[in-house]
Image (cartoon, helix red, strand yellow):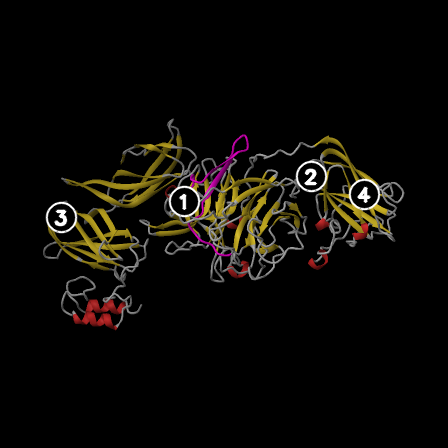
């Protein structure tokens, strides 16, 4: 059968076209009907060639065509006819889907000259599908109007269900081979300001690479060399296809946005699942203008193999073939119109207005759920909050006219800082059939904010009534810090993964994690969650720079069901008789299984206790630090076996921690306290209890920094009361002024000496530097933030005394202090 050739019309040629003249602007119809066609208004031939075709063996070629996008209301057959309606020579073809058929698409049915020069066709049709009816006219001298007859016969389709309930769907998203990660993994986007910085990363979410809840994890990460700002520009939306192909979309929400060398403001990029290589899948018709509108978000539907995208420029939702990159259909929320694959040729430049702008998209069953950006922090709407709607989609990924349905509005934001709600930037469905909606703080079309956005959980009851829970998941150590990305894994006892500003924010950890928060279902806050800083740098803040995410579809965890690690060091145990030969250790265990754990067993006679009950139980994702006593000799390597049991005493899983027992010949340092000074900003107070393990009476203790660290300890020498073997004394607080950053490890050496200084030993004390603010600059004696000649004058003025120039705290200002000042010279 000969095919047909079709070329998209340009914007300039489509603005004057009547409905039906082009396939991208087809007449919309359904059921039994008579459609009036004025062929004098149909000016386009669309270059169809039917000569010598199987359908039309005697046809000399089309002159004008008309397109109808038609939906059946019966399962059965349809008769489409021009017989008796006109004197013109007409042909009819029926195609599956509301499409622009090309030379590779064959009609389901077609006909010519059935009733003289007119024709009719009878073809099987199904409920829930849409069809393109192509009516062609040849040898036209006087084109005229006539009614096209459409009559169905069969079983009526089920009536549309008012307020149709959400269905439960399996997860979607294959494993990208290029990453080398075998299980659960997340693709995430971020804003970067350096051209060769990565704007897309993939993180391995295998539990073996995750740290304890409430601390930053540094999992294995994949980055393709071309996933950079200069190649892709700024991107936000993420999706993963069923074959592991990844997709990201251009954005204009980070304020300082740009396009990359591979595309433009309407680009969706395909990241090859096997090689990672990026390429432009499609460029939606976004126009450069002062407002610089780009795309909203994207989502993949595995059953139909369709990619959905929202566009801030034209306000349309696009259905896209992910293989060819061609549009399948478009839908405009503001008036509910299904507009065909060509979109809206009359769209004006600039952002779609608030209330007409779609952001999040999420296909579920036979519907596409989407969010409408109604208001934000900079532009509150006194009458409406941000909303979620849905529309029907057919088996080909086309939108079903007349099925638009309001679902729910976001509840008022419980914050005195807010006068409105923030837009929902991402939607996901979990195994509980609920929708998870991630808000993003926006203050304008192009400017992101922080700390006024939530993760909402919307669930329907059997009557279709939505219940919105805004408290189940607290995103960020600073609450309400959702950044607009959400995905839900389908692992039993799994987690909800959201992007977050301030997932961790300083405090006792000293870490600033801006990126991903993984919270075990059915909810929790940062303390029970996994945190991943997107740029793997926890020393700085990335406020407003975090994008969205998507995860792979995994039903069973591929990582260990528990992990364990040694906390701190191994301490020698001393009693009134001296060394006992036993050692004290602390081990942290994390439950990654989908079961509650009731008992921890340590099946080793040299370790006690052998059984530790958990009360309350240790749930999935939770951690516990346990105290153990280990017997052995110096330099022995001890491996502690650990076994989780559930309430029935059945084995859940196992782990092991190995370490070397130290030689107990100098000192024990315990009850260590490291706190920020209450008197001086940027200074830490260190205190500890020292137990003498030597055979000598200790009279002097020195607290010395690691050579070359630049840390200054005051006082560095402590004249202690006579300390016989195995006796203890409290030391401190000694003050430390350090250039180390919050979260860094600092090492001090604690030296023990007898009265004559001819016997000595040293024990290292390692601790994490807390966040004590900016503090003072080492050597800045006048407090102006700069070490310069004024500070040198102060130091020289106190030379030989214990005055303000005593930088190393040894009680005298001398050459050592001058060397410290010169090493810190400058701002």
Q: In x, y percent, where is residue 121?
A: 81, 39
Q: Main secondary structure of the magenta part?
A: loop
Query: In the orientation shown, which residue stands out farthest toward the top?
Result: 648
Compute the Cα span from label 2 to label 3.
90 Å
Residue at numbered disc 4: 147
Residue at numbered disc 1: 530
Instruction: Give the mark nearest the N terminus, 2 or 1.
Output: 2
Q: In x, y percent, where is residue 773?
A: 30, 56
Compute the Cα span from label 3 to label 4.
111 Å
Q: In x, y percent, where is residue 148?
A: 80, 42
Residue at numbered disc 3: 695
Left or right, residue 138 beside residue 669? right
Compute the Cα span from label 1 to label 3.
47 Å
Q: Nearer the viewer, mark 2 or mark 1?
A: 2
Left or right, residue 655 beside residue 320? left
Mark 3 residue element: loop
Mark 4 residue element: strand
Q: Is residue 452 magenta?
A: yes
> In the depicted view, which residue is nearer to us: 671 or 371?
371
Mark 2 residue element: loop
Q: Which residues are magenta?
A: 446-474
Circle 4/circle 1 CB separation < 8 Å? no
Residue in the picture at 70% in, 50% down? 24
Instruction: Give the mark nearest the N terminus, 2 or 3.
Output: 2
Instruction: Give the mark nearest the N terminus, 3 or 4.
Output: 4
Q: Nearer the viewer, mark 2 or mark 3?
A: 2
Instruction: Give the mark nearest the N terminus, 1 or 3.
Output: 1
Query: Can residue 813 be seen by looking at this rendering?
Result: yes
> In the depicted view, which residue is nearer to us: 131 or 685?
131
Compute the Cα span from label 4 to label 1.
64 Å
**Label drawn at residue 129:** 2
Residue in the picture at 81% in, 43% down? 147
């Amino acid at each position: 059968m000969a095919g047909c050739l079709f070329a998209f019309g340009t914007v300039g040629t489509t603005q004057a076209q009547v409905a039906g003249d082009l396939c991208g602007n087809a007449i919309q119809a359904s059921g039994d009907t008579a459609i009036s066609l004025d062929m004098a208004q149909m000016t386009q031939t669309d270059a169809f060639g039917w000569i010598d075709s199987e359908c039309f063996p005697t046809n000399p070629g089309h002159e004008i065509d008309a397109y109808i996008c038609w939906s059946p209301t019966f399962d059965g057959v349809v008769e489409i006819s021009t017989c008796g309606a006109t004197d013109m020579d007409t042909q009819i073809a029926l195609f599956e889907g509301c499409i622009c058929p090309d030379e590779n698409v064959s009609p389901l049915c077609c006909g010519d000259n059935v009733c003289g020069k007119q024709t009719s066709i009878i073809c099987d049709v199904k409920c829930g599908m849409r069809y393109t009816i192509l009516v062609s006219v040849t040898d036209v001298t006087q084109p005229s109007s006539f009614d096209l007859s459409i009559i169905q016969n069969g079983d009526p389709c089920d009536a549309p269900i008012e307020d149709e309930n959400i269905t439960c769907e399996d997860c979607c998203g294959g494993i990208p081979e290029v990453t080398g990660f075998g299980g659960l993994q997340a693709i995430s986007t971020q804003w970067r300001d350096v051209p060769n910085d990565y704007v897309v990363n993939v993180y391995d979410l295998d539990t073996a690479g995750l740290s304890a809840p409430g601390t930053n994890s540094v999992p294995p990460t994949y980055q393709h060399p071309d996933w950079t700002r200069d190649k892709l520009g700024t991107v936000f939306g993420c999706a993963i296809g069923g074959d592991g192909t990844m997709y990201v979309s251009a954005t204009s929400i980070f304020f300082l946005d740009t396009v990359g060398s591979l595309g433009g403001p309407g680009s969706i990029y395909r990241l090859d699942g096997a090689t990672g290589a990026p390429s432009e899948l499609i460029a939606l018709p976004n126009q450069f203008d002062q407002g610089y509108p780009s795309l909203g978000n994207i989502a993949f539907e595995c059953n139909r193999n369709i990619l959905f995208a929202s566009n801030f420029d034209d306000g349309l939702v696009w259905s896209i073939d992910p293989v060819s990159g061609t549009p399948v259909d478009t839908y405009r929320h503001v008036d509910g119109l299904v507009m065909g694959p060509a979109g809206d040729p009359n769209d004006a430049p600039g952002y779609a207005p608030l209330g007409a702008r779609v952001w999040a998209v999420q296909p579920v069953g036979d519907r596409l759920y989407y969010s409408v950006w109604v208001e934000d922090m900079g532009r509150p709407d006194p009458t409406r909050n941000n909303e979620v709607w849905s529309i029907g989609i057919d088996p080909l990924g086309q939108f079903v006219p007349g099925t638009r349905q309001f679902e729910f509005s976001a509840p008022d934001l419980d914050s005195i800082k807010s006068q409105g709600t923030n837009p929902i930037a991402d939607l996901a469905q979990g195994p509980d059939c609920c929708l998870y909606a991630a808000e993003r703080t926006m203050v304008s079309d192009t400017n992101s904010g922080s700390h006024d956005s939530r993760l909402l959980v919307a669930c329907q009851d059997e009557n279709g009534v939505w219940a919105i829970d805004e408290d189940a998941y607290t995103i960020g150590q600073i609450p309400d810090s959702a950044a607009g990305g959400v995905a839900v894994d389908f692992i039993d006892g799994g987690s909800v993964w959201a992007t977050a500003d301030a997932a961790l924010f300083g405090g006792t950890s000293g870490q600033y994690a801006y990126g991903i928060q993984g919270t075990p279902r059915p909810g929790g806050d940062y303390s029970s969650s996994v945190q991943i800083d997107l740029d793997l740098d926890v020393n700085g803040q990335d406020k407003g720079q975090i994008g969205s995410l998507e995860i792979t579809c995994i039903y069973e965890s591929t990582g260990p069901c528990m992990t364990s690690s040694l906390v701190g060091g191994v301490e020698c145990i001393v009693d009134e008789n001296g060394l006992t030969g036993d050692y004290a250790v602390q081990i942290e265990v994390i439950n990654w299984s989908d079961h509650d754990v009731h008992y921890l067993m340590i099946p080793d006679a040299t370790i006690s206790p052998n059984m530790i009950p958990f009360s309350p139980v240790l749930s999935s994702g939770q951690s516990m630090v346990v105290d153990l006593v280990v017997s052995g000799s110096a330099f022995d390597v001890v491996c502690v076996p650990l076994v989780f049991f559930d309430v029935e005493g059945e084995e859940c899983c196992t782990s092991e921690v190995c370490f070397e027992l130290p030689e107990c010949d100098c000192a024990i340092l315990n009850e260590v306290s490291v706190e920020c000074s209450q008197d001086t900003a940027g200074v830490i107070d260190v205190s500890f209890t020292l137990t003498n393990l030597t055979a000598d009476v200790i009279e002097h203790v020195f607290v010395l920094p690691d050579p070359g660290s630049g840390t200054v300890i005051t006082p560095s020498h402590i004249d202690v009361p006579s300390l016989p073997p195995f006796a203890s004394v409290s030391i401190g607080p000694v003050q430390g002024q350090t250039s180390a950053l919050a979260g860094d490890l600092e090492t001090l050496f604690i030296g023990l000496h007898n009265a004559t200084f001819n016997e000595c030993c040293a024990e290292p004390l390692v601790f994490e530097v807390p966040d004590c603010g900016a503090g003072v600059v080492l050597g800045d004696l006048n407090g102006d933030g700069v070490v310069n000649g004024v500070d040198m004058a102060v130091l020289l003025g106190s030379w030989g005394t214990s005055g303000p120039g005593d930088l190393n705290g040894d009680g005298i200002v001398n050459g050592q202090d001058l060397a410290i000042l010169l090493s810190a010279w400058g701002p």
